[in-house]
Image (cartoon, helix red, strand yellow):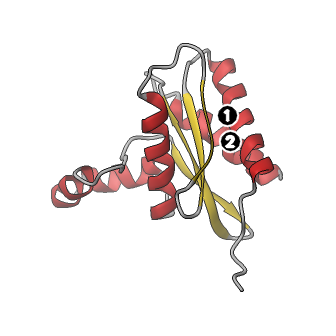
């Protein structure tokens, strides 16, 4: 039996709600996706005014962060410094190197991730951070 932490539906919804509340505070229309450690979608929402593609990009950011175990912001910076890595990863279906994907840690292990898309001036990252803070609060 595994001792891996589980991101349940109730916590996933609290994460989503906290991120959406931060988006309202920033006056930005985004989509938010929360996935489990395996990249399976637990919950997703698209705010009024968010573009039609935002849910797909948010999900890709969440899956990427869960799979790599690091924020997409950090991995994107590392990949930008390595043209071969950047080209290889950018060519992978469902992979996102843009800011706004952050792993969610529970009991020191990856339980899932949040992905946010739709901001145009760097808003995705702080919206995702608000969701991660809600996860830490339990």
User: Given the current orientation, which residue lies at the most extreme bottom position?
Assistant: 1
Could you say where residue 21 lies in the image, as x and y percent from the top left?
A: 72, 26
40 or 72: which is nearer to us?
40
Q: Earlier in the sequence, mark 2 or mark 1?
A: 1
Write the residue at 71% across / 59% down. 7
Write the residue at 42% across / 37% down. 57
Say above or below: 116 vs 42: above
The part of the image, by quadrant, that contains residue 8 is: bottom right
| Residue 84, disc | none
Say above or below: 121 vs 55: above
Q: Secondary structure at mark 1?
A: helix
Residue under label 2: 131
Quadrant where the N terminus sits is: bottom right
On the rendered structure, is 136 left or right of 84? right
Could you say where residue 88 lies in the image, as x and y percent from the top left?
A: 20, 58
Say above or below: 68 vs 21: below
Residue under label 1: 19
Could you say where residue 109 lies in the image, as x and y percent from the top left?
A: 65, 70
* Disc 2 crowd, CA 10 A, few/some/many (<14, 14-19, 20+): many
Q: CA distance from mark 2 to mark 1?
A: 5 Å
Label 2 with label 1: CB-CB less than 8 Å: yes
* Disc 1 crowd, CA 10 A, few/some/many (<14, 14-19, 20+): many
137 or 89: which is nearer to us?
89
Write the residue at 51% across / 63% down. 69
Q: Secondary structure at mark 2?
A: helix
On the rendered structure, is 109 left or right of 57? right
Label count reads 2
Write the residue at 75% across / 50% down. 9
Could you say where residue 10 lies in the image, as x and y percent from the top left?
A: 80, 48
């Amino acid at each position: 039996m595994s001792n891996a932490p589980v991101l349940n539906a109730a916590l996933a919804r609290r994460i989503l709600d906290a991120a959406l509340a931060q988006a309202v505070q920033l006056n930005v229309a985004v989509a938010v996706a929360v996935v489990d450690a395996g990249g399976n979608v637990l919950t997703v929402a698209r705010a009024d005014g968010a573009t039609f593609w935002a849910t797909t990009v948010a999900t890709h950011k969440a899956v990427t962060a869960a799979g790599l175990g690091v924020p997409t912001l950090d991995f994107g910076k590392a990949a930008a410094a390595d043209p071969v890595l950047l080209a290889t990863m950018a060519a992978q279906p469902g992979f996102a190197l843009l800011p706004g994907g952050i792993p969610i840690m529970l009991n020191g292990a990856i339980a899932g991730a949040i992905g946010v898309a739709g901001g145009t001036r760097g808003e995705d990252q702080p919206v995702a951070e608000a969701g991660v803070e809600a996860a830490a609060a339990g």
